[in-house]
Amino acid sequence: MNRNIKQPVIFNSISELHRALGLPKPMHPLISLVDYSNIKADTTDLEKGMLFNFYKISYKKNFSGKIKYGQSYYDFDEGGLSFILPNQVITALEGEADYGGYTLLIHPDFISNYPLGKSIKNYGFFSYSVTEALYLSAKEKEVITGLFSNIEQELNSAIDQISQDVLVSQVELLLNYSKRYYNRQFITRQTASNQLLARFETLLNKYFNEGKALSNGLPAVEQVAANLNVSTHYLSDMLRSLTGKNTQQHIHQKLIEKAKELLSTSQLSVAEVAYQLGFEHPQSFNRLFKSKTKVSPLNFRQSFN
């Protein structure tokens, strides 16, 4: 075992992170807005690995260093907005990164009694990799930084019975604007998205045409995304923005296309077609085929006779 591998520093509370960064105690124990320019502590050890038990939404003006998130590396030369779920490890390498900007830290307990506590999981960009950060136009930056300013102003005000309601509504507004801007980014980067779509189609065609489904089973969304070097949520959101279908729906569509081809041109039985496409049980294939085509595989084959 390699004893030189450092374990990430785990932060269970926002106050712990403030202390590690040499910052004053947070105005609220469950939500904090950090201005990177105020960090005075030596963060060299922290840059080797941190794990937060709270949400982290960061607006970074520019990056001059290399960032590692999960197994991906990315060199930033522009500012952007990134989102991190609780219990995710983030690492900064080489101590070069210029982190000018802000980070909003939100403990899950802060929103647990609000609808956002449940709906936050629907914002898929929290599961994007750092290479899929949101890049903002000048006008978009004004909106986002304005929301950060509103949150900062509320945190610096005297806490009353309405404070939490106001802060949660500001956070939700921030997330909704981010969702809108990500949809814009899919459109403005349509060339790159179309290239990814083409690679996705090629990957599925190769998988089914080379008989990999027979030996490896049905292609999993996670497997496909890993082969394309993107996160699962980013791939599904990108595909949905271009085609109206997510990754799983595309896989099913390709599977049905291949099933129709085998049923109409080969002598394989329905069960053999099911096995060829990666199904362990022909009944599962029959159900999926009928749900997508409104006819059974056998009736579809008979229509050609």
Image: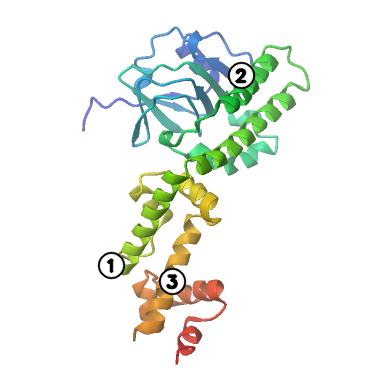
* Amino acid type of the residue tagged 2 in the rendering: Pro
Q: CA distance from mark 1 to mark 2?
A: 56 Å
Q: What residue appears at the point 48 percent right and 77 percent down from the top-left corner?
A: 286
The answer to whether 3 is drawn above or below residue 260 in the figure is above
* Amino acid type of the residue tagged 3 in the rendering: Glu
Residues 31 and 231: in front is 231
- The answer to which of marks 3 and 1 sits earlier in the sequence is 1
Mark 2 and mark 3 residues within 8 Å of each other at the beta carbon:
no
Q: Residues within 10 Å of mark 1 (few under 14, many from 20)?
A: few
Q: Residues within 10 Å of mark 3 (few under 14, many from 20)?
A: few
Q: Quadrant of residue 212?
A: bottom left
In the structure shown, which secondary structural element does the residue marked by tag 3 occupy?
A: helix
Q: CA distance from mark 2 to mark 3?
A: 54 Å
In the structure shown, which secondary structural element does the residue marked by tag 2 occupy?
A: loop
Q: Residue 16's spot in the image, x, y percent?
A: 50, 17
In this rendering, which labeled residue sits more in front, label 2 or label 3?
Answer: 3
Q: What residue appears at the point 52 percent right and 47 percent down from the top-left corner?
A: 237
Q: Residue 53's spot in the image, x, y percent?
A: 50, 29
Residues 48 and 11: in front is 48
Q: How is the image coloured?
A: rainbow
Q: Residue 213's spot in the image, x, y percent?
A: 33, 66
Residue pointed to by mark 2: 29
Q: Residue 78's spot in the image, x, y percent?
A: 43, 25
Residues 78 and 279: in front is 78
Could one spot residue 218 in this view of the protein? yes
Residue pointed to by mark 1: 210
The quadrant of the image that shows the C terminus is: bottom left
- The answer to which of marks 1 and 2 sits earlier in the sequence is 2
Residue pointed to by mark 3: 257
* Amino acid type of the residue tagged 1 in the rendering: Glu
Could one spot residue 30 in this view of the protein? no
